[in-house]
């Protein structure tokens, strides 16, 4: 694989598309939680927001599969030179965790919802919390590069390279 200087337009679109879908998932999370507990209590709490949450999860999974395939075939740019080894390792682990979660969290949600597996629902909840922690760390890292290091790292997610 040749040296990649930036992310492709497809990679950028997939990144921001998943971000938007995850925000939609966040906004419909409580409705889905209500629907899930309703099933366990003999109530029908499944409404439009819960259905939207399910379909957002399916879409996140589909886009994540495409994103991983593109990343494996095209690659990704290296971190800027002159970084700090510990912070670079944190960045790599954060990205790995985010990729794992955008793949595994929807799967756990689908197994819980369509398969009625309580343990998958619990795993989905734990992954939900982990996703927001890692996403927050990802954003803090991006802002650190943009405003403290001023190394232009965020430009890679704005313009195809």
Image (cartoon, helix red, strand yellow):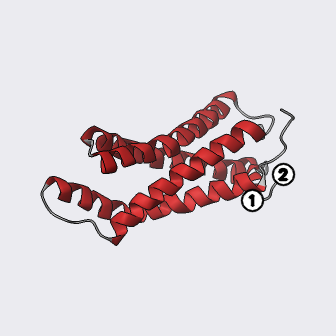
Name, please, the residue furthest toward the front: 115
Dot 1: element: loop
The crowd level at tag 2 (other Cα within 10 Å; few <14, some 14-19, many 20+) is few
At x 84% / y 51%, what residue is drawn?
161
Dot 2: element: loop
At x 12% / y 56%, what residue is drawn?
41
Within the image, what quadrant is residue 115 found in? top left
Name, please, the residue furthest toward the top: 85
Name, please, the residue furthest toward the left: 42
At x 34% / y 64%, what residue is drawn?
50
Within the image, what quadrant is residue 85 found in? top right
The answer for how far apart the CA atoms under marks 1 and 2 are is 9 Å
At x 19% / y 56%, what residue is drawn?
39
| Residue assigned mark 1 | 158
The crowd level at tag 1 (other Cα within 10 Å; few <14, some 14-19, many 20+) is some
Compared to residue 93, the image places residue 13 above or below, namely below
Q: Along the horizontal axis of the image, is 13 left or right of 5?
A: left
130 or 124, which lies in front?
Answer: 124
Within the image, what quadrant is residue 122 found in? top left
Question: Which quadrant would the N terminus be assigned to in this image?
Answer: top right
> Can the viewer see residue 51 in this picture?
yes
149 or 18, which lies in front?
Answer: 18
Q: Position of residue 5 (x, y in %)?
A: 85, 44
Compared to residue 142, the image places residue 126 above or below, namely above
| Residue assigned mark 2 | 161
CB within 8 Å, label 1 to label 2: no
Q: Along the horizontal axis of the image, is 132 left or right of 11?
A: left
């Amino acid at each position: 694989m040749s040296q990649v200087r930036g992310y492709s337009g497809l990679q950028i679109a997939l990144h921001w598309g998943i971000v938007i879908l995850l925000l939609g998932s966040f906004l419909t999370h409580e409705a889905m939680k209500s629907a899930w507990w309703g099933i366990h209590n003999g109530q029908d709490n499944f409404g439009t927001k819960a259905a939207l949450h399910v379909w957002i999860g399916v879409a996140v999974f589909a886009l994540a599969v495409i994103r991983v395939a593109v990343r494996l075939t095209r690659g990704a740019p290296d971190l800027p030179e002159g970084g700090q080894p510990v912070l670079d390792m944190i960045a790599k682990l954060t990205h790995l965790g985010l990729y794992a979660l955008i793949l595994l969290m929807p799967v756990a949600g689908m197994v819980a919802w369509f398969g009625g597996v309580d343990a998958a629902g619990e795993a989905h909840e734990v992954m939900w919390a982990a996703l927001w922690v890692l996403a927050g760390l990802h954003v803090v890292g991006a802002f650190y590069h943009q405003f403290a290091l001023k190394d232009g790292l965020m430009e890679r997610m704005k313009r195809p390279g």
